[in-house]
């Protein structure tokens, strides 16, 4: 491999020719500038220099190889010859100024973690985590639905002993919620997915590893506290079937117990708070919004079809889950295609703005395809602004097997809390579920029944024009 | 009994070993720290010293004996040897700074009392009284329901003479509302329940004494202005039947005229404003939220079942009321179990957050079990943010016999108003009821009929999935 | 008649004995203190002195004789011996500081007048005019209803020539709205009802004179610009039939063309902004709120019944209107009792708070008693926050003959505008009605039809439990 | 033609006699003062002097001849004798202070342009563009409707290739939206309609030229980038048929491909923010609001009727569109009268306030006249606060062929952006449409179907009383 000098590297520091060194290798990322999900600006910041530490703060080490073509790798460089990446004065000042965060014992509910995260995260991290598509109305609507679902507690039942155990895809979970896959976890904590894995293991919680984590899938798998700890893989099915196959094989080898195929994002949602930061950092050279993104992504597959499920089924025995079902018609199709579970989600409002709330889709299924509810051949999961034990209870009473918790898991690692934060989060939710099961008169998840939820206001919002 | 010295006592001033002196007796409260409903912090403040005045400012003298096990009583101490409990400099300054409160004549409606209370009460007192569970949405929803119930006044009826008399459990009341049981009344006034009893007697109003008042049940009973004054006892049925029996016997002896069995709190609601103050005062040692509380309480009985009602019935002739019915199914069950009354309540939003509003449960009963409405064998009471005469009128017109007023009674004692405040509160509500009965065209409670309430918007929120 | 000296008068300046001089006569108002609708405080301000100018600024000269018993008149006094009533320094300063008000041409809509009024009026005047009962939710709800009624304009109709003429009780009006009766008009302008009468005459608008105007009924009648100008009298039917009869005779003599019998206020609504000012000005001696007012009023008649209509009918040929009908049941009763018109009103939200909006009652009548709509034997009027031409159009399209405008007429006189202000107000509304009739495709009031109003949202709020 | 001196001209500078010089000609505009849509104030500012530059900044050169009668032209003047129109000191200062506007790349969504416009526009320009009639509730309601329409994305469809092409009145458009006709475009940019035409041509977008543009129709037609570029003419049908005919002939000659006959404004809506500015600038001499405007306009035709359509049809072969249909009854009438398209619009809330939202009228048509939906003989267009790609998608899925975008096109020219701004706007919307079509699972406009929209909440608002 060719050796490249620091001088040579430094000459390629513009939009026209942009070279970067990462882990002692030099890459030409010029053609990739506009495809970089974080925007060209972040690449240009390190143009003509060593990008290793910037890269590591966000990405999985293997990502660069998976993403760039072979031609992009130009040669090697002796990184000792490169100026060490140091904090700027500004960054140092900020580091010393760092606010102190409250002790975990003062974190009393899930929203408390969000307040810490808002202070702790960089503007980019906060924008990436907290934002949603366009006007962010779906995200708010997800929360609104839980507000208009009212509970009908039953009385005089012995609730001394309450169990929150559920079986998800055949695996025992101590609670009826799991950790959603989330991108760019390193904004929240350097150990990111390792924290999540360790906390999940110790608390008996399942987690779904994102397709593109900030560490390798194998590293995260090794962080399991015991071989029986349950992890699943989120799957964005690669356009290149050989790449898709290879990822599935890795998942099987790493002990993943199911594949959560993301189907609500054939293209990228328009997350404007992200875009706005990129526009600011790039000035007038910012990439066009919206349109340019279609089909250009390395992660998304705009061509994925129902027929592709058969291929996936043919190459693996792992249970399959469709993540992002948003209409009863697709729930029925999914059932007919034999997936083990459907996951009602609008991607936390991050894909299509003004899409209906997942819990409304659950009610839609109850109304139009009641045979899918609590069907032994199909589990149903739900997410979308789960912040309270009562949110969980509402979904379960209406027929979900479990719910997903996403952003809060990231928030709980911030403030330096790391693994302890995640465990505290889990226990807050677990405590709220147990306490509220006691108040509603249920000692097991099975005893959570639809008549415990006054869903009248929400039912007035179920689409009346469904034809199956 | 062993005699303990001040020095000895002072050695036990930590979480690991926490002794307290109260009324000349020394207790080891270490095992009780996490069970203390006010949080361990309050106990630790007096650890190794004399807690008598702190104890008296909140609790009934007998509570300590009822709560702690015999082993907790370590011995006696000569309290003259203990430093007298004095006000801290800060507390003195605060006492001198004390704001002046408006004359009662300037208090024009119920909410005015709340404004005074917010200023007068300590942070702990305000948090305890005003807070509700979790996001406090049920408390707000209770109020919302009264807003969407509209009145339909009838005209050209002679309303020169209006009577607000009702018969509650066979006892005459001058008004169709009563005083709810409330905890920790001493935050509001040193004479607490004595004020309530005296005011209630003079104004012809019934009251429900809490299971755990800040003075003894007998003291409160003696504060009646005449033997015919009506008091009831709120009953958290003790897990230990002998303790439950003994309390019922005391109630009978003290002349209580009915038992209001609380059924909406088998476990404690998660009141975060309370928890937050405790967390602050304890720093990183704060008890875990939520989960730890289940089953640990000395007051609550998570195992109370319908079958236990038969036992209670077998040991007393007092009328029984179920306080905290929240679904028509349980209203019907209660009727079948032969209780004298049901009390629709979500505990002022303090138990389960997002539980439906009690007045919505009343409409639910009207719809699904109309035979329970104005049934001679079953009375129905309602509470939940009753703040106006029109709120009372709405509940009565829809079928309730009487309504409960809780927080406002506490608020009305603050600002130094004491008994006079409570009487003023009663007369404000009485005046609003009379005035609005005049406006709606009713001269007696019987003339308040359902068609006087346009309940259309609320009826759209009645759960449609009830199966009886 | 006995002569009283200034010294003698001055000795009676307390709550225990309160004498006042008005127009050279001395009255003992001690027994009347608590009945004074403006509160005892206003009387006590002039206690032991000359109250003439204070009296005149608010009241009709005859009111004192009508209100007080004969024993109250103690004797005469030489008013030249009394200190002349002068402005306090504070009042002088305020008078010089007086803000300038915008030219009428800058007043573009009805709400603009309210902004002027808020600045111009004394705190008492503003509170009296703008307030409503209790939480003032009915007032807001009246406005809300107009917001949820949507219009459905029709196109391609010749609207070059638009007439807004209507016939009210057989009398031509140039517009489909009239001036409501309102109390204490002198707060707004010294010439009060004279302005209203003059403006109404010049603009071809009808008005309803209040039972208790700030000038005599005869003075107001004389202010008509021509004998054919139409005025009606609002009638609070006096408890004493001889007094009622005498007022009706005066009305007939003065040329009033109908009697608007107020039926929504058998007792006084609880207007807390008023009460609060009185409480402030009286300190701890303020009268009890609410209850004390029932039955004590000289104006209101809590005993008025349907049967009394027959008596009124028997003594006069004037058309009778029931003002304050709030339920379809009473609309039907009114029709059966043969009144010429019903006036749907909740007294601008000033009587019973949370009473349903009058326009909702109109929809209720459309639904349950459609035969009353556009019935030649019964006219229907509506009021309640009419602020826009579209509000008027909505009421008319749904079946009302005309609507009432109350508070804005008072506001339009403030800022020194007087008669010109009232005329400007009338023309703003007339202009909006004409313009919007053009836009909706109607050239006459008859062409305003129900299908021009999308009342769907409001219809969901019509009470479903009506039994006729 | 008579020659007039500067001195002579200067003598006519008042309301009583107001002369203006424009392009070397002197006009007596005294009788026209009150008819001037911009208010008399603007004319009086230049009274007795040269108004050429003020005139040009707003108007089409031909407008003056079209509007004024022949008698108004008094003679010629040597403009070199007139003081040159220069900026006042204030205006100069303002010009130097001019804020800098963000680069277009930072404009990420349609609302961003509105923020720029609010800063850039003169108070008059901002008021004219952004305001709506009366309380502006229809404008807000238009937006609310899009919020309550929720989307139901379908999954696992190949969306790699997405087309947004539609055929409007037989002409291909690259996107399913067009540029609405808007008045006074020169406030936004000196080149106004030229920018719009150029941008539309380059981006393959249709536009509707206003009846009264700020440049001549022919100039705008010449700005087309190719002869095949599609432009239509908005037609306010002149009361004088010969003038109407002449305009239609010019439209045909200029290559306009259809006539959009405005039918929602037989009279002018009451736009109070406009009126308020005029009132301010004129002080106490401001024209009466509302009523004076009926019938006085040179543009509007209050007498236009359904029968007139036959005449228009008889004189031209251009397709006819009715712009401003607001009720299903009129949609059916329009269809029966054989127009090529109806355009559901409440004029952006600028005509009749509280008129129902156009998208609600679309749902009304779906319910009561479904045969009009996707009918080959009738296209349906919709406008009213289209700000997002999802707004467009909702209208199309419910049966519209295309939607109109109005205010944003003006806003996008401000900040000096001109043609580039308009193109950026178009591409933002195009990008959002493509992206969201991908997310909802549609690759062509035809694949947008009603079941993709959960319209349940909006359907509850459809008027129930339609009789066809």
Image: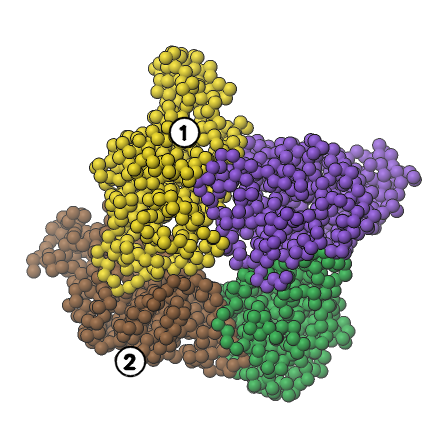
Chain colours: A green, B purple, C yellow, D brown
Q: Residue at x 64, y 38 (%)?
A: B172
Give coordinates of residue D214: x percent, y percent. Answer: 25, 64
Q: Secondary structure at mark 2?
A: loop
Quick one: which residue is furthest to the right in this view?
B2
Give coordinates of residue D283: x percent, y percent. Answer: 27, 45
Q: Residue at x 57, y 57 (%)?
A: B367
- In the image, residue A211 sits, relative to residue C103, either above or below, namely below
Residue C57 appearing in the image: no
Residue receiving disc 2: D228
Q: Tag 2: Cα neighbours inside 10 Å, few (<14), some, or many (≥20)?
A: few
How far separated are the C-alphas under marks 1 and 2?
87 Å
- Are the residues flagged by discs 1 and 2 in contact, CB closer than 8 Å? no
The picture quadrant where one finds residue A378 is bottom right
Residue receiving disc 1: C240
- D112 or A432: nearer the eye? A432
Q: Tag 1: Cα neighbours inside 10 Å, few (<14), some, or many (≥20)?
A: few
């Amino acid at each position: 491999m060719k050796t490249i000098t620091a001088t040579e590297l430094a000459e390629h520091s513009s939009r026209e020719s942009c070279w970067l060194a990462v882990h002692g290798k030099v890459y030409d990322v010029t053609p990739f500038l506009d495809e970089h999900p974080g925007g060209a600006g972040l690449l240009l910041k390190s143009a003509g220099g060593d990008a290793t530490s910037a890269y590591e703060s966000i990405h999985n080490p293997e990502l660069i190889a998976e993403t760039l073509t072979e031609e992009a790798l130009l040669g090697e460089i002796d990184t000792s010859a490169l100026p060490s990446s140091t904090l700027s004065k500004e960054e140092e000042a900020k580091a010393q100024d760092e606010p102190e965060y409250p002790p975990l014992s003062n974190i009393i509910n899930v929203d408390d973690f969000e307040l810490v995260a808002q202070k702790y995260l960089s503007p980019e991290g906060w924008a990436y985590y907290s934002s949603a598509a366009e006007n962010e109305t779906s995200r708010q609507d997800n929360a609104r639905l839980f507000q208009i679902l009212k509970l009908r507690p039953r009385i005089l039942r012995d609730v001394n002993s309450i169990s929150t155990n559920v079986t998800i895809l055949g695996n025992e979970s101590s609670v009826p919620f799991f950790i959603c896959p989330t991108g760019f976890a390193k904004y929240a904590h350097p150990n990111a997915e390792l924290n999540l894995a360790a906390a999940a293991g110790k608390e008996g919680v399942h987690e779904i590893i994102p397709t593109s984590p900030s560490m390798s899938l194998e590293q995260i798998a090794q962080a399991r506290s015991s071989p029986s700890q349950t992890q699943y893989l989120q799957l964005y099915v690669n356009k290149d079937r050989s790449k898709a196959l290879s990822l599935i094989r890795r998942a099987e080898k790493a002990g993943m117990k199911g594949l959560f195929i993301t189907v609500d994002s054939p293209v990228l949602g328009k997350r404007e708070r992200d875009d706005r930061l990129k526009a600011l950092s790039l000035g007038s050279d910012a990439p066009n919004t919206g349109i340019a993104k279609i089909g250009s992504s390395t992660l998304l597959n705009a061509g994925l079809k129902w027929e592709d499920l058969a291929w996936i089924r043919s190459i693996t025995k792992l249970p399959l889950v469709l993540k992002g079902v948003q209409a009863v018609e697709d729930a029925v199709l999914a059932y007919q295609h034999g997936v083990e579970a459907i996951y009602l989600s609008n991607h936390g409002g991050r894909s299509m703005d003004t899409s209906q709330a997942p819990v409304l889709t659950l009610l839609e299924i109850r109304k139009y395809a009641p045979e899918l509810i609590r069907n032994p051949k199909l589990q149903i999961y739900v997410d979308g602004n789960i912040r309270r034990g009562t949110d969980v209870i509402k979904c379960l009473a209406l027929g979900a097997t479990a719910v997903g918790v996403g952003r809060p898991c990231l928030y709980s690692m911030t403030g330096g809390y790391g693994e302890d934060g995640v465990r505290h989060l889990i226990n807050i939710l677990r405590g709220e579920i147990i306490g509220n099961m006691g108040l509603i008169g249920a000692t097991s998840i099975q005893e959570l029944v639809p008549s415990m939820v006054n869903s009248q206001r929400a039912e007035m919002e179920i689409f009346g024009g469904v034809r199956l």
